[in-house]
Image (cartoon, rainbow, N blue to C red):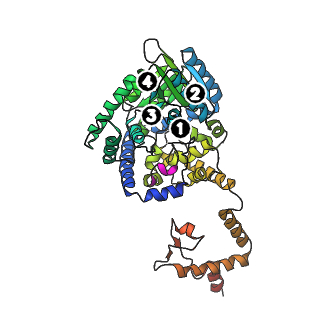
Amino acid sequence: MGRNPVTWLGSPTFPRAAHEALGNTQLRTNLRKATTTIRGKREQAVAELPDWEELRRAGEAVKDDVLAHLDTYLLRLEEAVTARGGVVHWARDADEANRIVLDLARAKGAEEVVKVKSMATAEIGLNSALEAGGVRAVETDLAELIVQLGDDLPSHILVPAIHRNRAEIKEIFARRMPEAPDSDDPGELAEAARRHLRRKFLSAKVAVSGANFAVADTGSIAVVESEGNGRMCLTLPETLITVMGIEKLVPTWRDLEVFLQLLPRSSTAERMNPYTSVWSGVTPGDGPSEFHLVLLDNGRTATLADEVGSQALRCIRCSACLNVCPVYERTGGQAYGSVYPGPIGAILAPQLAGDMSDKQAASLPFASSLCGACYEVCPVRINIPEVLTHLRAEAVAAKSKRNPEALAMSGAAWVFRDPRRYEAAQRAGSLSRFLAGDDGTIRRLPWPGSKWTATRDFPALPKESFRTWWRRRRG
């Protein structure tokens, strides 16, 4: 399944994809149940900490410090990783990162690699690149495995298969997994996946991971997860390759402490992740004998240059914004056409893609009601509504001056500049009342007004404008 960096090839614009998703009642049921459950648990977990707001502000401050001095911290990280026996690779874009990983896997004679769940590798389309080079990637996170076996696309940062129910998962396993259970019991499905993956863990020579955090001072890489599959990938194979976005740094171990409190409560609504794996380079006789760290740019440096948009790089991929977003809850993640769905995807994906003239990317900042719930739950205080409006302005500026919207605005400006034209337009507009129903609402207008009424109702204008009424009242 080919993808270009950040966005999927052939993805329609968000309005078109969302319209199709809204017709899928099973999808909406699955999403509503899952997001409501996660949202409620998160609220309880956060309420336990009286200093939660102080932690959020600390996380924001640490991330802003990293972004302001990113070059210094990256060089410090490279020095620390190298001193501990690791090898650091720098990748400017997806093609370069994929080539590095493929070359490393081939050098070890690996025909198959096991993978820890990683947004960065999904962003660059690593699985497809490896497959094209003769190396199969096996996802070991249960939800990622479901997506992979179903030839599907993920729809959530934390729970990629959130759009699937257990009956659908049973069908996928029966089709693609040896010894699949004839049951949709979650325990039996999980056990079948466990048996399937155990064979992969024990035979793999190479593992690929992402990174939740990297400590610049010590060269330590941290991965947090809930199933134990990550721990297997990070310790059993001979070679470990980590692909990490350059923004995932924290300066010190003390800074890491802040995020190990913020992340689990915001994502899985747990006080602490069941598995927190941290390693620094290589240790003879313990874990992989080779460690490679691929530092990925892929649009991040360009994003950093945007004073407003750069705050998106604070993101720690917790998915809290998805679980409170009324738009995401109704459309699901695949409608965004990006590996980063929901509110954070609406601001991150267009910036990493770096092309607001692209219709699909330009449609994402409009995939929001601007209700602000995402900002309220973000553990690092990313002002997502502010970035959304900022990117909307960029999308409008990137459009041709002769597009329908620009022409309509020019026409409106011409009308508003002259009182007589303005009053004539009001009188003409009052005729719209004849298109209204008994409740005074217009539900269908001819083109181009149909663009509006396709998604919202239009109140009919009154027979008499305020200006005319006032003039008549004064005699």
Q: Are the residues tagged 4 and 3 within 8 Å (C-beta)?
A: no
Is residue 70 shown in magenta? no
Q: Position of residue 364 (x, y in %)?
A: 56, 51
Which three-letter amino acid code belongs to the residue tagged 4? Leu
Which three-letter amino acid code belongs to the residue tagged 2? Ile
Name the residue furthest top: 284
* Residue 253 at least partly seen: no
Q: Which residue is mark 2?
A: 100
> Residue at horizontal 32%, vertical 31%?
194
- Residue 166, above or below 101: below
Q: Answer with left or right where residue 410 lies relative to residue 371.
A: right
Task: Point out which mark residue 234 bears.
Answer: 4
Secondary structure beneath disc 2? helix
Which mark sits nearer the N-terminus, 3 or 1? 3
Real-space Cα distance between discs 1 and 2?
13 Å
Which image quadrant for residue 308? top right
Q: Which residue is mark 1?
A: 125
Disc 2 versus disc 3: nearer the observer = 2
Which mark sits nearer the N-terminus, 4 or 3? 3
Q: Which residues are magenta?
A: 331-337
Q: Which residue is mark 3?
A: 117
Which three-letter amino acid code belongs to the residue tagged 3? Lys
The quarter of the rendered structure image containing the C terminus is: bottom right
